[in-house]
Image (spheres, grey):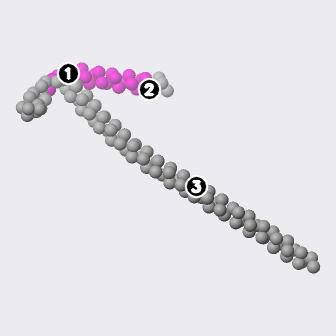
Amino acid sequence: MTGLKFMFLLVIVILFVLFGVRNMHDVEINYYNPGLKLQTIYVHLLYVILSSLFVGAVFGWSTSIIKQIKLKRIIRKKDKQVKEIEEELNKIRLTSAPASQDSEEKEISVSSASGNDAEK
């Protein structure tokens, strides 16, 4: 599997290098500096594309991190609810266990008493 990953990475790197070689001409970028004066710089097209790709990747990563944090918070709340419900269920089982044992003892005494009546 690592050989397949290496081949895939090698193809990506080759395509990236070919793209970079073909797009080395300069482009003009106009922007306003902090003093609100229009300035112009010249940058390789490859750098413009890579910087926009990087900004997009950071934006996508940050939104996914925010979503993961929200989901983890929801999971913690649900785990707490499950724990509370399990504790409540255990309490119900403990309180109903002696009552059910008493009813079983009554059933046994009733059936044995009716069995004695049948013998007479």
- Which residue is the site of mark 1? 24
Q: Position of residue 20 (x, y in %)?
A: 25, 22
Residue at 58%, 55% in the rendered image: 87
Residue under pointer 2 = 5
Determine whether 100 is above or below 113 in the image: above
Residue 63, horizontal then vertical, whole percent: 33, 41
What's under tag 1, amino acid-wise? Met
Q: Nearer the viewer, residue 5 or 106?
A: 106
- Asked if labels 3 and 1 touch by Cβ distance under 8 angstroms, the answer is no
Q: Quadrant of residue 8?
A: top left
Task: State which tag comes first along the sequence, 1 or 3.
Answer: 1
Q: Which residues are magenta?
A: 4-27
The residue at 29%/21% (across/down) is 17
Task: Identify the residue under disc 3.
Answer: 87
Residue for point 54% across, 52% down:
83
Amino acid type, residue under disc 3 in the picture: Glu
Q: Which mark is residue 60?
A: none
